[in-house]
Amino acid sequence: MLRLDAKAIEERIADLLAEMTLEEKVGQLTLSNGGGGHVPDWLRDAVRSGRTGAVLNEVDLDSVNELQRVAVEESRLGIPLLVGRDVIHGFRTVFPIPLGQAATWNPELVERGARIAALEAARCGVNWTFAPMIDIGRDPRWGRVAETLGEDPYLTSVLGAAMIRGFQGNDLHAPGSLAACAKHFAGYGASEAGKDYNTTNIPENELRNVHLRPFRAAVEADVATLMTSFSDIDGVPATANEFLVDEVLRGEWDFDGFVVSDWDSVSQLAVHGLTENDRESAFQAARAGVDMEMASTTYAHHLADLVEEGRIGPPHLDHMVANVLRIKFRVGLFSRPYVDPDIFPAFGCSDHLDAAREAARQSMVLLQNREHALPLRSDEFRSIAVIGPMASEPYEQLGTWIFDGDQALSRTPVQSLRERLRGRVDVRHARGLETTRSRDRDGFDEALHLAHASDVVVAIVGEESILSGEAHCRSDIGLPGAQAELVKELAGAGKPLILVVMAGRPLVLGDLPGHVQAIVYAWHPGSMAGPALTDILLGEVSPSGRLPVSMPRTGGQIPIYYAHKNTGRPPTPETFVHIDEIDAGAPQLSIGNTSFHLDVEPSPAWPFGFGLGYGDVRYRAVSCPTPELKMGESLEVIAEVTNHGPYPVDEVVQVYVRDLVGSVTRPVRELVAFRRVHIEPGEVTHVTFHIPSDDLAFHGRDMKRRVEPGRYHLWVGGSAAATLQTEFELIADE
Ligand code: BGC
């Protein structure tokens, strides 16, 4: 297969540019929606005449190969097409939603999931995916929090890079590799009030230190493309934002792939009120450095005129086209435009389902386990009531963005528990509620009857997939419908009650933890929800998922995230006063002046990084053998961790630091390293980390990235609330 080196690619690009007409150049910058299973005449004509260089949403292989044939054989210059699709968390085989995958804290597993998704999508002719989404998810009202990798820039950076490696493979040119697209550049996660597409107001320091960090990591991981966000950031929508695209992405980070708009986000510049019409929108987006327009057609209609009028210079246009062609060469399209499906593994083959099961297992977070209610010992009971509207839902367990997911591959919890316990335990099922949103209590009687008649109750509740994802935001993120009532009434049966939550976001569980013995937070686990949950409930594996987000106690706490600033008046247990504690008898002028809400404890319900297992993991000691770190070197950190419990566990050992004094205020803690380690019962293990001084960098007042000397506190433990602490000093260069 012909493979060109970087120099030869640039030469070929220059040759092509020299031959292309203005219309053909604009065609390479136009991304058109496919016909969804056939090749419509207008699209055939557009490809043949070079008026479109990329297609999205066509996954019928015959149609894709036919479109490629028209591009290669019938268009004047024979330039093949990019074929894009939202392959977000699997293709036919569905992996946990990205937020669930983030809960694995396992980069290798995340990479493997993306690799499998790439192989299945490539079988249909897809060569470009609109993933990973690496927006920071600090507002669970926002439906797209499901697509994020959580609240933390470091975790998102590490897992986003892992996804890119999975999609793009070791070799982007090889069959089965997809060009990845890091999105949405930038700041989309800060949409006000967690309402999709809403305005964002992010000061530059926060933008750089939090929201841009994963994108910088994506560029370092050689991501092929980036997508601009829908949102308006500090008065300039991202799709027209020269600072973001031209200055930071191209200027500071040297990105040489291409930038695509989001769906209609170029024409929407006029809706934002930034431009008067499509021509001006095309101008502003192109000027900012958005190379390709998705869906809307302002480039197709106006870019050539803008060049002819001299508003967009020909070199600028050529630069945009070159960015697109470069990726087409890197993906190998010129040497291999057609797809032979037989070289790829079958959809949903056992290898893929096994990987999806492992990902689902590792994504589930055990939040509570009173009286060791879990694991269920199947020799100790004869019947189990599996109740709830999410217990037997092959489609709903898949979560958002599953255009190509095959629900026929889904195995539900009810099915899997029945299979696994057949002949030993009677597994009964009742929905209790028609849907998670339902308030109709008609099904309660049957559910309660089963609960009373069974030895153990597993309630599987949450949110259907439609309640999260793009544009599916909620202002109240409690359990929808009458589910909380159902769970409380089930508790009245007096049986061990295990609560399983399948949802696209961290929900506010209110007082439910007090009514149940154990809580497994399962997100939307994908195709293999049933087998994975069964493995955990029956103790075949110890739960090892860890929260990639802080779980709020109330919606009013949002945004709540562990890496907040200290403020000048941080609350302490001594200064916090709950509304119920205010003395009614004596009028008071003040009950103190620290930063808290009167009606809720300042901490989250469960902190970032938290998750239980069936072992008894204890953090014994942490040390930095050389507590003076020189610039450019790495800090060695050694943690001693033991498992006193009877089960082998996978523990996610986490390291947090605090830069005590900075030229700008620094978060109270920041995750700087983590590792999954397997610990046998009774084992004492020493986990060593090497933290490069550069990982402590941040952007200062001048917005430049820097590492500042000074004292740091360091914690090691199983969550952002870890208490085992040491400190070190970062020494300035002489
Ligand atoms: C979403 C993108 C997605 C695109 C193409 C948009 O509505 O914001 O994330 O990649 O559609 O489907």
Image (cartoon, grey):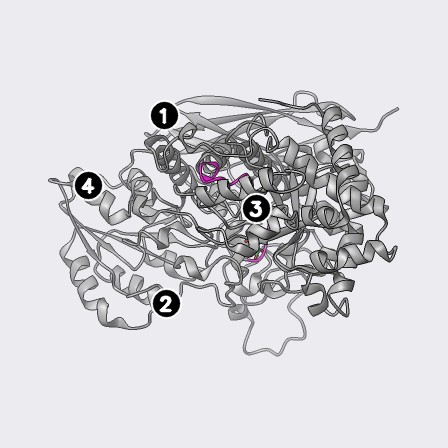
User: Are the two marked residues, 2 and 4, in contact with CB atoms closer than 8 angstroms?
Assistant: no
Q: Which residue is mark 1?
A: 681
Tell me residue 18's x, y (percent). 79, 37
Gap between marks 2 and 1 measured at Cα: 43 Å
- The quadrant the C terminus occupies is top right
- The front one of 635 and 589 is 635
Query: Could you tell whether 602 is left or right of 255 in the image?
Result: left
State the mark number for residue 578. none
Going from N to C along the chain, the mark reached first, 4 or 1, is 4
Q: Which residue is mark 2?
A: 437
SS under mark 3: loop
Tell me residue 269's x, y (percent). 71, 64
Write down the region rendered in magenta. Answer: 121-139
- Of badges 4 and 1, the one in the foreground is 4
State the mark number for residue 419. 4
The image shows residue 699, relative to residue 273, as above or below, that is above
Gap between marks 1 and 3 measured at Cα: 43 Å
Q: Which residue is mark 3?
A: 130
- Of badges 3 and 4, the one in the foreground is 3
Label 3 Cα neighbours within 10 Å, binned few <14 / some 14-19 / many ≥20: many
The residue sitting at 37% across, 68% down in the picture is 481
Going by the numbered disc 3, the residue's amino acid type is Phe
Going by the numbered disc 4, the residue's amino acid type is Glu
Give the residue furthest to the left. Answer: 423
Examine the image and state in which quarter residue 276 appears: bottom right
Going by the numbered disc 2, the residue's amino acid type is Arg
Residue 439 included in the magenta stretch of the image: no
Some atom of ligand 1 lies within 8 Å of the CB belonging to the residue at label 3: yes
The image shows residue 437, relative to residue 720, as above or below, that is below
Examine the image and state in which quarter residue 377 appears: top left
Going from N to C along the chain, the mark reached first, 1 or 3, is 3
SS under mark 1: loop
